[in-house]
Amino acid sequence: ICFLLFLISTFICNVLLLAFAFLYLDVSLLFFLFLLKAFFDGFVIFIGSKRFFSPVSLLDFTFWFMVQPLYVPVVGVLGLVGVFSWKK
């Protein structure tokens, strides 16, 4: 159940960040939210890479961080409507 909660929170955070980017005009607050997300995502990646002995490059992290707010909601919604199938 913890993993499910993690997935749901990741989806909600990315949807809200994406919506906020398109609907809200305060650039400084949006920048702060992106920095906050970068800090927490970086922390999770750092802990995971140490735990599983799998280093992650800064370039890979930066690319994924920039793509994730769009990728997660799109794939999540398409998965719910049956476009993607993770189990057969």
Image (cartoon, rainbow, N blue to C red):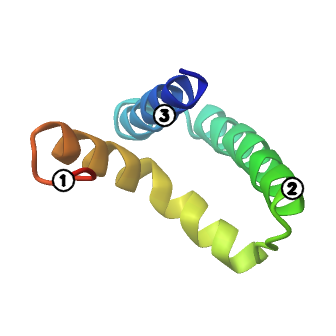
Name the residue that disc number 3 marks.
7
Q: Earlier in the sequence, mark 3 or mark 1?
A: 3
Within 10 Å of disc 3 (Cα), the crowding (few <14, some 14-19, many 20+) is some
Q: Quadrant of residue 30?
A: top right
Q: Earlier in the sequence, mark 3 or mark 2?
A: 3
Q: Residue at x 37, y 55 (%)?
A: 71
Within 10 Å of disc 2 (Cα), the crowding (few <14, some 14-19, many 20+) is few
Give the number of marks. Answer: 3
Locate residue 15, reporting x and y percent. Answer: 39, 34
Locate residue 41, reporting x and y percent. Answer: 71, 47
Q: Quadrant of residue 49?
A: bottom right
Q: Earlier in the sequence, mark 1 or mark 2?
A: 2
Name the residue that disc number 2 marks.
51
Q: Amino acid at mark 3?
A: Leu
Residue closest to the eye, 56 or 13: 56
Q: Residue at x 75, y 55 (%)?
A: 45
Locate residue 1, reporting x and y percent. Answer: 53, 21
Q: Residue furthest front?
A: 88
> Which of pointers 3 and 1 indicates the residue nearer the eye?
1
Q: Is residue 45 above or below residue 30?
A: below
Q: Are marks 3 and 2 in contact (CB under 8 Å)?
A: no
Q: Quadrant of residue 55?
A: bottom right
Q: Residue 88: which numbered mark, if any? A: 1
Q: Amino acid at mark 2?
A: Arg
Q: Is residue 30 above or below residue 85?
A: above
From the viewer's perspective, tell me whether residue 43 is left or right of residue 35: right
Disc 1 secondary structure class: loop
From the viewer's perspective, tell me whether residue 64 is left or right of residue 50: left
Q: Residue furthest left?
A: 82
